[in-house]
Amino acid sequence: MLKKLLVLLLTSVLTFPLATSVFAQDAPAKEKAAKAARWEGHVLRSSTDNSTLTVRKVGSSDERTVKYDSSTRWVSQEHGSKKVNDITSGDVKDGDRVICTGTWDKDGVLHATLISKRLTGM
């Protein structure tokens, strides 16, 4: 009986640190994946077939792919204005300035939850 109790105690002492380390490594990965991302610039190319925009950062040659889907919200807004207008993906053309927010995937593609077309002041 004493041997069984000792074996059980030893097993739990060895198992607990291993389980803790496995779950501790998993938590930061989920936290990092959920971090919101932002990319802004001018639309170089748009592909309605692939549901993507290629956006070049203003004042740079850095380009990123922005992927959208049916859940992506599309809006337009003038600089300095609080008024936000709902638009569709067809209202964004090559050359337009956009601000995209969402999450990055492992391939460096931004999956957009919001795409805001920036309008010039009149």
Image: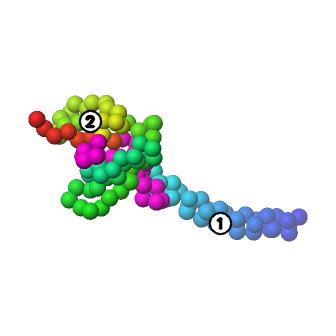
According to the picture, the residue beneath numbered tag 1 turns out to be: 18
Left or right, 13 with reference to 79: right
Q: Does residue 26 lie above or below 48 as drawn?
A: below
The quarter of the picture where the C terminus appears is top left
Q: Is residue 43 left or right of residue 32?
A: left
Q: Residue at x 65, y 62 (%)?
A: 19
- Tell me if residue 112 is in the magenta stretch: yes
Which residue is found at the position 70% from the left and 68% from the top?
Answer: 14
Q: Residue 50 or 102: which is nearer the viewer?
A: 50
User: What residue is drawn where x is 85% and y is 65%?
Assistant: 4
Front residue (pair 33, 8): 33
Q: Secondary structure at mark 2?
A: strand
Q: Amino acid at mark 2?
A: Ser
Instruction: Check if mark 1's residue and mark 2's residue have beta carbons within 8 Å.
Output: no
- Answer whether residue 41 is magenta in the image: no
Q: Position of residue 90 (x, y in %)?
A: 34, 36
Residue that badge 2 annotates: 76
Image quadrant in which the N terminus is located: bottom right
Q: Is label 1 in a helix, a strand or a loop?
A: helix
Residue for point 30% across, 40% down: 92
Question: What are the residue bounds of the magenta stretch?
Answer: 93-114
